[in-house]
Each structure stands twice: as C-alpha cells, then as structure tokens.
Amino acid sequence: MPRSDFRLACPLRVRWAEVDPQNIVFNAHYLMYFDVAATEYWREIGCEYPARFLAHGVDTFVEIGPGQVLSRLIRRISGDVKAISLNDAVVALLGQREDGTGK
C-alpha cells in the first residue's frame, strides 16, 4: 500500500540500543514503537491522553512495558481508574520467584 493510503505517517528513528549486532531491532521494542504510533495518532485526531479517555468513561489502563511508570502516572492523574501493569498481572497469575521475577 502506498503511504498516501494512510491518514498518518509517524517517522521513527531506530536507536543503536534497540538493535542487536546484526542491526535487527529486538522484538520487545516493537511494542514501544506501537505505543508511539498510537499516541501520535490520538494527538493528530485531537484526543488528549489520558484526559479525553477519562472523560469518555474509560476506567482501566494496562501498561504493557516493563516497570510501572505509566501505571503510577495514571493513578496520580485520577484515583478513580484502575492502572494495571502487565507485569503485575503475570505475577498475579503465575506467582513470583524468590529472585523477584515471575515463574
């Protein structure tokens, strides 16, 4: 499909830390690229994140990246929403190892 068929083009520059020695992007970074593209699309159509989602009744946010940075931010913005880290969900489902990681 030609680029003109798409409503939005969001250029991303792959950084050195995101590739292996053969210059192949590590698979885990594709989720981050998706997040950047989705955020830019919302911005392009005038949807302020997360305020607009909250105004439309969204009550649960799921963080798919490592850590809980976004989950904590959402909780600070509005205490009325659920902010779930995917890591927390996996640990709750599978349990936690002694080293602090999931099973």
Image (cartoon, rainbow, N blue to C red):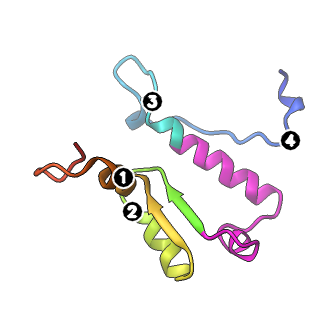
For marks 1 and 4, give the one nearer the viewer.
Answer: 1
Residues packed near mark 2 inside 10 Å, few (<14), some (14 to 19) or many (20 plus): some
C-alpha span from label 1 to label 3: 17 Å
Up the image or down, 76 lies above or below 65; here it is below
Q: Which mark is residue 7?
A: 4
Say which label, 2 or 1, has the lower sequence index.
2
Please give the range of residues in magenta: 32-59
Residue 38: x, y in percent? 67, 49
Name the image quarter holding the N terminus: top right
Check contact, mark 2 vs mark 1: CB within 8 A: yes
Within 10 Å of the Cα at label 1, are there few (<14), some (14-19), or many (20+) other Cα atoms? some
The disc labelled 2 sits on which kind of residue?
Answer: Gln
Spatial CA distance of label 1 from label 4 is 33 Å
Q: Amino acid at mark 4?
A: Arg
Which type of secondary structure does the marked residue at label 1 adopt?
A: helix
Q: x, y percentage for residue 6?
A: 84, 35
| Amino acid carrying mark 1 in the image | Asn
Amino acid on which disc 3 is placed: Asn
- At x 42% / y 35%, what residue is drawn? 18
Secondary structure at badge 3 equals: loop
Q: Quadrant of the rendered structure where residue 12 is?
A: top right
Relative to the observer, which residue lies in front, 68 or 97? 97
Q: Which residue is mark 2?
A: 68
The residue wearing badge 1 is 87
